[in-house]
Image (cartoon, rainbow, N blue to C red):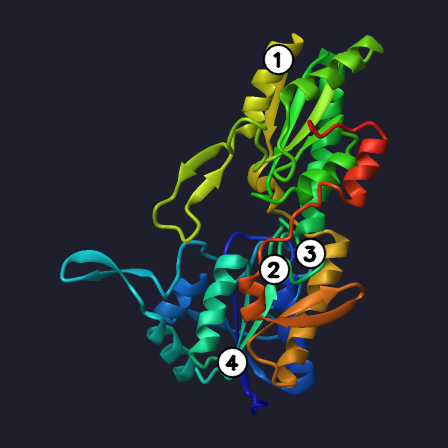
Amino acid sequence: MKTTIKRIGIMTGGGDCPGLNPVIRAVTKTAINEHGWEVIGIRNGYKGLYDNDWVKLDGASTSGLLHKGGTILYSSNKDNLFHYLVEENGEMVYKDVSDVGVENIKNLGIDVMFIIGGDGTLTSARDFARKGVNVIAIPKTIDNDLASTDTTFGFNTAVGVATEALDRLHTTAMSHHRIMVLEVMGRYAGWIALHAGIAGGADAILLPEIPYDIHKVAKKIEDRKAKGKNFSVIVVGEGAKPVDGEVVVREIIEDSPDPIRLGGIGLKVAHDLEKLCGNEARATILGHLQRGGSPSSSDRILSTRYGVAAVKLAVEGKFGNMVTLKGDQMSYDSLENVIGRKSKNVNPNGELVDMAKSIGIVFGD
Protein backbone atom coordinates (compact mmCIF):
# COMPACT_ATOMS: atom_id res chain seq x y z
CA MET A 1 0.00 0.00 0.00
CA LYS A 2 1.07 3.57 -0.67
CA THR A 3 1.75 5.88 2.25
CA THR A 4 2.15 9.62 2.67
CA ILE A 5 5.89 10.19 2.83
CA LYS A 6 7.37 13.26 4.49
CA ARG A 7 10.58 11.95 6.03
CA ILE A 8 12.82 9.02 5.12
CA GLY A 9 15.76 7.33 6.81
CA ILE A 10 18.91 5.88 5.23
CA MET A 11 21.40 3.48 6.79
CA THR A 12 24.34 1.40 5.62
CA GLY A 13 25.31 -1.95 7.11
CA GLY A 14 27.96 -4.64 6.66
CA GLY A 15 31.39 -4.11 5.15
CA ASP A 16 32.20 -0.84 3.40
CA CYS A 17 31.97 -0.84 -0.37
CA PRO A 18 32.84 1.56 -3.20
CA GLY A 19 29.56 3.20 -4.21
CA LEU A 20 27.86 3.52 -0.83
CA ASN A 21 28.30 7.29 -0.73
CA PRO A 22 26.96 7.74 -4.28
CA VAL A 23 23.86 5.74 -3.28
CA ILE A 24 23.33 7.95 -0.22
CA ARG A 25 23.77 10.98 -2.47
CA ALA A 26 21.32 9.71 -5.09
CA VAL A 27 18.60 8.81 -2.57
CA THR A 28 18.97 12.15 -0.77
CA LYS A 29 19.03 14.31 -3.90
CA THR A 30 16.05 12.51 -5.48
CA ALA A 31 14.04 12.61 -2.25
CA ILE A 32 14.60 16.34 -1.77
CA ASN A 33 14.62 17.59 -5.37
CA GLU A 34 11.68 15.60 -6.69
CA HIS A 35 9.52 15.08 -3.61
CA GLY A 36 10.50 17.58 -0.94
CA TRP A 37 11.06 14.87 1.67
CA GLU A 38 13.26 15.29 4.72
CA VAL A 39 16.14 12.84 4.93
CA ILE A 40 17.61 11.35 8.10
CA GLY A 41 20.84 9.35 8.07
CA ILE A 42 21.21 6.60 10.69
CA ARG A 43 24.87 6.34 11.66
CA ASN A 44 26.80 3.12 12.41
CA GLY A 45 24.26 0.70 10.96
CA TYR A 46 21.85 -1.13 13.23
CA LYS A 47 23.88 -0.08 16.26
CA GLY A 48 22.98 3.51 15.45
CA LEU A 49 19.34 2.56 15.07
CA TYR A 50 19.44 1.12 18.59
CA ASP A 51 21.37 4.10 20.01
CA ASN A 52 19.19 6.64 18.15
CA ASP A 53 22.34 8.01 16.50
CA TRP A 54 21.33 10.07 13.48
CA VAL A 55 22.13 13.10 11.36
CA LYS A 56 20.07 15.20 8.97
CA LEU A 57 21.06 14.85 5.32
CA ASP A 58 20.57 17.53 2.68
CA GLY A 59 22.10 18.84 -0.52
CA ALA A 60 25.05 20.36 1.30
CA SER A 61 25.95 17.29 3.37
CA THR A 62 25.80 14.98 0.33
CA SER A 63 27.63 17.31 -2.06
CA GLY A 64 30.93 15.93 -3.32
CA LEU A 65 30.14 12.33 -2.38
CA LEU A 66 30.10 10.85 -5.88
CA HIS A 67 33.82 10.07 -5.97
CA LYS A 68 34.32 9.24 -2.28
CA GLY A 69 34.71 5.68 -1.04
CA GLY A 70 33.33 4.32 2.21
CA THR A 71 30.16 5.68 3.81
CA ILE A 72 29.61 9.01 5.55
CA LEU A 73 27.01 7.21 7.71
CA TYR A 74 29.62 4.67 8.90
CA SER A 75 28.81 0.99 9.19
CA SER A 76 28.90 -2.10 11.37
CA ASN A 77 28.94 -5.75 10.35
CA LYS A 78 28.41 -7.20 13.84
CA ASP A 79 25.15 -5.69 15.06
CA ASN A 80 21.85 -7.52 14.66
CA LEU A 81 19.01 -6.03 16.72
CA PHE A 82 17.17 -9.35 16.63
CA HIS A 83 20.17 -10.92 18.40
CA TYR A 84 21.92 -8.05 20.14
CA LEU A 85 24.45 -8.11 22.96
CA VAL A 86 23.21 -6.04 25.92
CA GLU A 87 24.00 -5.81 29.62
CA GLU A 88 21.36 -7.27 31.90
CA ASN A 89 21.77 -7.73 35.66
CA GLY A 90 25.51 -7.20 35.37
CA GLU A 91 25.94 -9.78 32.60
CA MET A 92 26.23 -9.49 28.81
CA VAL A 93 23.43 -11.46 27.12
CA TYR A 94 21.91 -11.65 23.66
CA LYS A 95 18.37 -10.32 23.34
CA ASP A 96 15.87 -9.36 20.66
CA VAL A 97 15.86 -5.55 20.93
CA SER A 98 14.30 -4.91 17.53
CA ASP A 99 11.32 -3.16 19.17
CA VAL A 100 13.73 -0.42 20.28
CA GLY A 101 14.67 0.09 16.64
CA VAL A 102 11.02 0.21 15.56
CA GLU A 103 10.24 2.71 18.31
CA ASN A 104 13.16 4.94 17.33
CA ILE A 105 12.00 4.93 13.71
CA LYS A 106 8.53 6.01 14.84
CA ASN A 107 9.86 8.68 17.20
CA LEU A 108 11.98 10.15 14.42
CA GLY A 109 8.91 10.36 12.21
CA ILE A 110 10.52 8.21 9.53
CA ASP A 111 7.95 6.99 7.02
CA VAL A 112 10.31 4.80 4.96
CA MET A 113 13.67 3.22 5.82
CA PHE A 114 16.18 2.79 2.98
CA ILE A 115 18.54 0.03 4.11
CA ILE A 116 21.72 -0.58 2.10
CA GLY A 117 23.58 -3.82 2.74
CA GLY A 118 24.33 -7.44 1.97
CA ASP A 119 22.92 -10.74 3.24
CA GLY A 120 23.13 -10.05 6.96
CA THR A 121 21.94 -6.45 6.80
CA LEU A 122 19.08 -7.31 4.46
CA THR A 123 18.00 -10.30 6.55
CA SER A 124 17.34 -7.85 9.36
CA ALA A 125 15.70 -5.48 6.85
CA ARG A 126 13.29 -8.27 5.97
CA ASP A 127 12.60 -8.89 9.64
CA PHE A 128 11.89 -5.21 10.24
CA ALA A 129 9.53 -5.25 7.26
CA ARG A 130 7.71 -8.16 8.92
CA LYS A 131 7.30 -5.94 12.00
CA GLY A 132 5.52 -3.31 9.93
CA VAL A 133 8.38 -0.96 9.01
CA ASN A 134 8.18 0.43 5.46
CA VAL A 135 11.49 -0.83 4.08
CA ILE A 136 13.17 -0.31 0.72
CA ALA A 137 16.37 -2.33 0.40
CA ILE A 138 19.41 -1.63 -1.79
CA PRO A 139 21.90 -4.48 -2.40
CA LYS A 140 25.55 -3.94 -1.51
CA THR A 141 28.38 -6.41 -2.01
CA ILE A 142 31.67 -6.34 -3.88
CA ASP A 143 31.30 -10.13 -4.25
CA ASN A 144 28.45 -9.82 -6.81
CA ASP A 145 26.83 -12.92 -5.33
CA LEU A 146 23.24 -11.78 -4.71
CA ALA A 147 20.94 -13.94 -6.82
CA SER A 148 18.17 -11.40 -7.32
CA THR A 149 20.23 -8.81 -9.20
CA ASP A 150 22.61 -9.07 -12.14
CA THR A 151 25.34 -6.76 -10.84
CA THR A 152 26.00 -5.06 -7.52
CA PHE A 153 27.82 -1.75 -7.14
CA GLY A 154 31.37 -2.06 -5.85
CA PHE A 155 32.08 -5.18 -7.88
CA ASN A 156 33.50 -3.32 -10.87
CA THR A 157 35.79 -1.29 -8.62
CA ALA A 158 37.01 -4.40 -6.80
CA VAL A 159 37.77 -6.12 -10.10
CA GLY A 160 39.69 -3.04 -11.23
CA VAL A 161 41.82 -3.04 -8.07
CA ALA A 162 42.53 -6.77 -8.42
CA THR A 163 43.38 -6.37 -12.11
CA GLU A 164 45.86 -3.59 -11.36
CA ALA A 165 47.42 -5.79 -8.68
CA LEU A 166 47.86 -8.60 -11.22
CA ASP A 167 49.45 -6.17 -13.68
CA ARG A 168 51.97 -5.15 -11.02
CA LEU A 169 52.65 -8.73 -9.93
CA HIS A 170 53.39 -9.70 -13.52
CA THR A 171 56.47 -7.46 -13.63
CA THR A 172 57.86 -8.84 -10.37
CA ALA A 173 57.11 -12.43 -11.40
CA MET A 174 58.90 -11.96 -14.71
CA SER A 175 61.89 -10.16 -13.17
CA HIS A 176 62.55 -12.87 -10.58
CA HIS A 177 61.27 -16.02 -12.37
CA ARG A 178 58.69 -16.40 -9.62
CA ILE A 179 55.23 -17.79 -9.21
CA MET A 180 53.09 -14.93 -7.90
CA VAL A 181 49.77 -15.81 -6.29
CA LEU A 182 47.11 -13.18 -5.70
CA GLU A 183 44.31 -13.98 -3.23
CA VAL A 184 41.14 -11.94 -3.71
CA MET A 185 37.86 -11.57 -1.82
CA GLY A 186 34.52 -13.09 -2.74
CA ARG A 187 33.94 -15.67 -0.03
CA TYR A 188 32.24 -18.66 -1.67
CA ALA A 189 31.67 -16.90 -5.01
CA GLY A 190 34.48 -16.53 -7.53
CA TRP A 191 33.30 -13.54 -9.54
CA ILE A 192 36.14 -11.19 -8.58
CA ALA A 193 38.76 -13.87 -9.16
CA LEU A 194 37.28 -14.86 -12.52
CA HIS A 195 36.89 -11.35 -13.93
CA ALA A 196 40.21 -10.06 -12.59
CA GLY A 197 42.01 -13.22 -13.70
CA ILE A 198 40.78 -12.82 -17.26
CA ALA A 199 41.40 -9.07 -17.35
CA GLY A 200 44.81 -9.39 -15.70
CA GLY A 201 46.14 -12.20 -17.89
CA ALA A 202 46.45 -14.80 -15.13
CA ASP A 203 47.82 -18.20 -16.08
CA ALA A 204 45.53 -19.99 -13.63
CA ILE A 205 42.34 -19.00 -11.81
CA LEU A 206 41.25 -21.00 -8.78
CA LEU A 207 37.58 -20.57 -7.90
CA PRO A 208 35.41 -21.72 -4.99
CA GLU A 209 33.06 -23.27 -7.54
CA ILE A 210 35.76 -25.49 -9.09
CA PRO A 211 37.79 -27.55 -6.58
CA TYR A 212 41.34 -27.64 -7.94
CA ASP A 213 44.02 -30.29 -8.39
CA ILE A 214 47.28 -28.56 -7.56
CA HIS A 215 49.18 -30.93 -9.88
CA LYS A 216 47.20 -29.64 -12.86
CA VAL A 217 48.12 -26.10 -11.93
CA ALA A 218 51.77 -27.18 -11.60
CA LYS A 219 51.61 -28.75 -15.07
CA LYS A 220 50.54 -25.41 -16.53
CA ILE A 221 53.56 -23.78 -14.88
CA GLU A 222 55.92 -26.49 -16.17
CA ASP A 223 54.47 -26.15 -19.69
CA ARG A 224 55.18 -22.43 -19.58
CA LYS A 225 58.74 -23.07 -18.41
CA ALA A 226 59.24 -25.48 -21.30
CA LYS A 227 58.37 -22.61 -23.63
CA GLY A 228 60.87 -20.29 -21.98
CA LYS A 229 58.37 -18.50 -19.71
CA ASN A 230 59.92 -19.02 -16.30
CA PHE A 231 57.25 -17.19 -14.33
CA SER A 232 53.53 -17.56 -13.72
CA VAL A 233 50.74 -15.52 -12.15
CA ILE A 234 47.86 -17.20 -10.32
CA VAL A 235 44.70 -15.61 -8.94
CA VAL A 236 42.84 -17.41 -6.15
CA GLY A 237 39.40 -16.70 -4.72
CA GLU A 238 39.49 -16.77 -0.91
CA GLY A 239 36.92 -19.59 -0.86
CA ALA A 240 38.82 -21.87 -3.24
CA LYS A 241 39.71 -25.35 -2.03
CA PRO A 242 41.61 -28.39 -3.33
CA VAL A 243 39.67 -31.42 -4.53
CA ASP A 244 40.75 -33.35 -1.45
CA GLY A 245 40.60 -30.51 1.08
CA GLU A 246 38.55 -27.73 2.64
CA VAL A 247 38.51 -23.95 2.58
CA VAL A 248 41.11 -22.16 4.66
CA VAL A 249 39.56 -20.35 7.63
CA ARG A 250 41.58 -17.42 8.96
CA GLU A 251 39.59 -16.92 12.17
CA ILE A 252 36.20 -17.23 13.83
CA ILE A 253 34.56 -14.02 15.05
CA GLU A 254 32.17 -15.20 17.74
CA ASP A 255 30.16 -11.97 18.08
CA SER A 256 29.49 -11.60 14.35
CA PRO A 257 26.33 -12.76 12.52
CA ASP A 258 28.72 -14.22 9.92
CA PRO A 259 31.51 -15.59 12.12
CA ILE A 260 33.69 -17.42 9.56
CA ARG A 261 36.54 -15.33 8.13
CA LEU A 262 38.21 -16.94 5.16
CA GLY A 263 41.80 -16.23 4.21
CA GLY A 264 45.12 -17.92 3.63
CA ILE A 265 44.43 -20.12 0.61
CA GLY A 266 46.86 -18.00 -1.42
CA LEU A 267 49.69 -18.87 0.96
CA LYS A 268 48.83 -22.57 0.71
CA VAL A 269 48.76 -22.49 -3.08
CA ALA A 270 52.11 -20.65 -3.22
CA HIS A 271 53.71 -23.12 -0.80
CA ASP A 272 52.40 -26.14 -2.69
CA LEU A 273 53.48 -24.82 -6.10
CA GLU A 274 56.98 -23.93 -4.88
CA LYS A 275 57.45 -27.52 -3.71
CA LEU A 276 56.13 -28.98 -6.97
CA CYS A 277 57.74 -26.60 -9.48
CA GLY A 278 60.94 -25.38 -7.82
CA ASN A 279 60.32 -21.71 -8.59
CA GLU A 280 60.25 -19.30 -5.69
CA ALA A 281 56.58 -18.57 -5.00
CA ARG A 282 55.09 -15.58 -3.20
CA ALA A 283 51.50 -14.84 -2.19
CA THR A 284 49.80 -11.47 -1.93
CA ILE A 285 46.51 -11.22 -0.05
CA LEU A 286 44.76 -8.17 -1.48
CA GLY A 287 42.21 -8.00 1.35
CA HIS A 288 40.48 -4.75 2.18
CA LEU A 289 42.20 -2.81 -0.58
CA GLN A 290 39.40 -4.15 -2.77
CA ARG A 291 36.75 -2.50 -0.58
CA GLY A 292 38.28 0.92 -0.18
CA GLY A 293 38.93 4.00 -2.25
CA SER A 294 36.98 5.79 -4.95
CA PRO A 295 34.36 3.88 -6.94
CA SER A 296 34.97 3.41 -10.65
CA SER A 297 32.98 5.47 -13.14
CA SER A 298 30.84 2.40 -13.83
CA ASP A 299 30.06 1.96 -10.13
CA ARG A 300 29.28 5.67 -9.72
CA ILE A 301 26.63 5.37 -12.42
CA LEU A 302 25.27 2.05 -11.11
CA SER A 303 25.08 3.35 -7.53
CA THR A 304 23.17 6.40 -8.71
CA ARG A 305 20.76 4.21 -10.65
CA TYR A 306 20.12 2.08 -7.57
CA GLY A 307 19.48 5.13 -5.40
CA VAL A 308 17.07 6.81 -7.79
CA ALA A 309 15.22 3.55 -8.50
CA ALA A 310 14.87 2.91 -4.75
CA VAL A 311 13.12 6.24 -4.25
CA LYS A 312 10.76 5.42 -7.12
CA LEU A 313 9.85 2.15 -5.37
CA ALA A 314 8.98 4.11 -2.24
CA VAL A 315 6.83 6.56 -4.21
CA GLU A 316 4.94 3.58 -5.67
CA GLY A 317 4.46 2.13 -2.18
CA LYS A 318 6.36 -1.05 -3.02
CA PHE A 319 7.73 -1.64 0.46
CA GLY A 320 9.43 -4.83 1.59
CA ASN A 321 11.32 -4.99 -1.71
CA MET A 322 14.93 -4.70 -2.86
CA VAL A 323 15.81 -2.72 -5.94
CA THR A 324 17.56 -4.85 -8.58
CA LEU A 325 19.24 -4.64 -11.97
CA LYS A 326 17.85 -7.01 -14.61
CA GLY A 327 19.57 -6.70 -17.97
CA ASP A 328 19.66 -2.95 -18.63
CA GLN A 329 16.53 -2.21 -16.59
CA MET A 330 16.11 -1.38 -12.91
CA SER A 331 13.53 -3.66 -11.26
CA TYR A 332 12.84 -5.12 -7.81
CA ASP A 333 12.31 -8.32 -5.89
CA SER A 334 10.73 -8.99 -2.51
CA LEU A 335 13.04 -9.30 0.47
CA GLU A 336 11.35 -12.61 1.23
CA ASN A 337 12.64 -13.93 -2.10
CA VAL A 338 16.04 -12.26 -1.83
CA ILE A 339 16.85 -13.72 1.59
CA GLY A 340 15.39 -17.11 0.72
CA ARG A 341 17.60 -17.62 -2.32
CA LYS A 342 21.05 -19.13 -2.50
CA SER A 343 24.03 -17.03 -3.50
CA LYS A 344 24.72 -16.41 -7.18
CA ASN A 345 27.83 -18.41 -8.01
CA VAL A 346 30.06 -18.76 -11.04
CA ASN A 347 28.84 -21.47 -13.42
CA PRO A 348 31.77 -23.88 -13.87
CA ASN A 349 30.42 -24.69 -17.33
CA GLY A 350 29.48 -21.12 -18.20
CA GLU A 351 30.64 -18.98 -21.10
CA LEU A 352 33.24 -17.00 -19.13
CA VAL A 353 34.98 -20.10 -17.79
CA ASP A 354 34.84 -21.75 -21.20
CA MET A 355 36.27 -18.63 -22.84
CA ALA A 356 39.09 -18.46 -20.32
CA LYS A 357 39.99 -22.09 -20.96
CA SER A 358 40.01 -21.43 -24.70
CA ILE A 359 42.83 -18.90 -24.28
CA GLY A 360 44.86 -21.22 -22.08
CA ILE A 361 43.88 -20.29 -18.54
CA VAL A 362 43.64 -23.34 -16.29
CA PHE A 363 41.28 -23.82 -13.36
CA GLY A 364 42.85 -26.92 -11.88
CA ASP A 365 40.00 -29.19 -12.90
> Could you tell which of marks 4 and 3 lies nearer the N-terminus?
3
> Could you tell which of marks 2 and 4 lies nearer the N-terminus?
2
Q: Secondary structure at mark 1?
A: helix
Q: Give how far apart the Cα atoms at labels 4 and 3 are.
A: 30 Å
> Could you tell which of marks 1 and 2 lies nearer the N-terminus?
2
The dot on residue 67 is 3
For the point 74% across and 70% down, the residue is 330
| Dots 3, 2 in contact, CB < 8 A | no
Give the label, 2 or 4, closer to the camera: 4
Instruction: Give, as a three-letter code, the residue at label 1.
Output: Glu
Q: Quadrant of residue 222?
A: top right
Q: Give how far apart the Cα atoms at labels 3 and 2 are.
A: 10 Å
Q: Quadrant of residue 132?
A: bottom left
Q: Say which of 113 and 56 sits in front.
A: 113
Q: Quadrant of the C terminus?
A: top right
Q: Secondary structure at mark 4?
A: loop
With 321 as the anchor, is 107 left or right in this view?
A: left
The residue that mark 1 highlights is 274
Q: Residues within 10 Å of mark 3 (few under 14, many from 20)?
A: some
Instruction: Give, as a three-letter code, the residue at label 3.
Output: His
Where does the image place residue 290, in percent across and percent down from the top left? 62, 43
Q: Residues within 10 Å of mark 1 (few under 14, many from 20)?
A: some
> Could you tell which of marks 1 and 4 lies nearer the N-terminus?
4
With 84 as the anchor, is 321 left or right in this view?
A: right
> Please, is residue 59 above or below residue 261 in the view?
below
Give the label, 4 or 3, closer to the camera: 4
The residue that mark 2 highlights is 20
Q: Give how far apart the Cα atoms at labels 1 and 4 are.
A: 56 Å
